[in-house]
Image (tube, grey):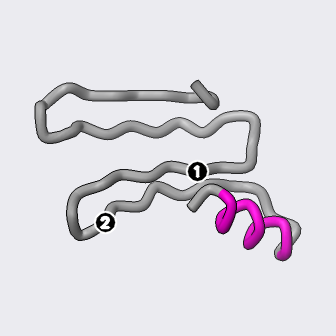
Amino acid sequence: MDRSLREALTEQQGRGGVIALSRAGEVKMGFNTEGMHRGVVRADGVPMVRSFAD
């Protein structure tokens, strides 16, 4: 997904990101900027919050 996002944004000369959720509950986050605020709470109830590529 990260490669597809980068390719699509590059084609459009854009910058940004996406948070995607599959039917199975899998969370994918990708971006082509220095950072993107994002977060998720998984099934175990533990929150995860990030701002950069960590």
> Circle 1 sits on which residue?
30
Instruction: Give x and y (percent) for residue 22.
Output: 31, 66
Locate the C terminus by quadrant: top right
Q: Mark 2 to mark 1: distance in Å?
A: 14 Å
Q: Taking 37 as reference, is 27 left or right?
A: left
Residue 22, disc: 2
Instruction: Give x and y (percent) for residue 24.
Output: 21, 63
Instruction: Give x and y (percent) for residue 13.
Output: 87, 68
Instruction: Give x and y (percent) for residue 52.
Output: 62, 28
Q: Earlier in the sequence, mark 2 or mark 1?
A: 2
Q: Residue at x 56, y 62 (%)?
A: 1
Rendered position, 43 above or below 54: below
Q: Amino acid at mark 2?
A: Ser
Q: Secondary structure at mark 1?
A: strand
Query: What secondary structure is the stretch in magenta mostly built from?
Result: helix
Q: Taking 30 as reference, is 19 left or right?
A: left
Residue situated in front as seen by the camera: 23 or 12: 23
Q: Residue furthest left?
A: 44
- Residue 12 falls in which quadrant of the image? bottom right
Q: Residues within 10 Å of mark 2 (few under 14, many from 20)?
A: few
Residue situated in front as seen by the camera: 16 or 6: 6
Q: Residue at x 73, y 49 (%)?
A: 32
Per the rendered image, the range of residues in magenta is 3-11
Q: Amino acid at mark 1?
A: Gly
Q: Residue at x 34, y 28 (%)?
A: 48
- Residue 47 falls in which quadrant of the image? top left
Q: Residues within 10 Å of mark 1 (few under 14, many from 20)?
A: many
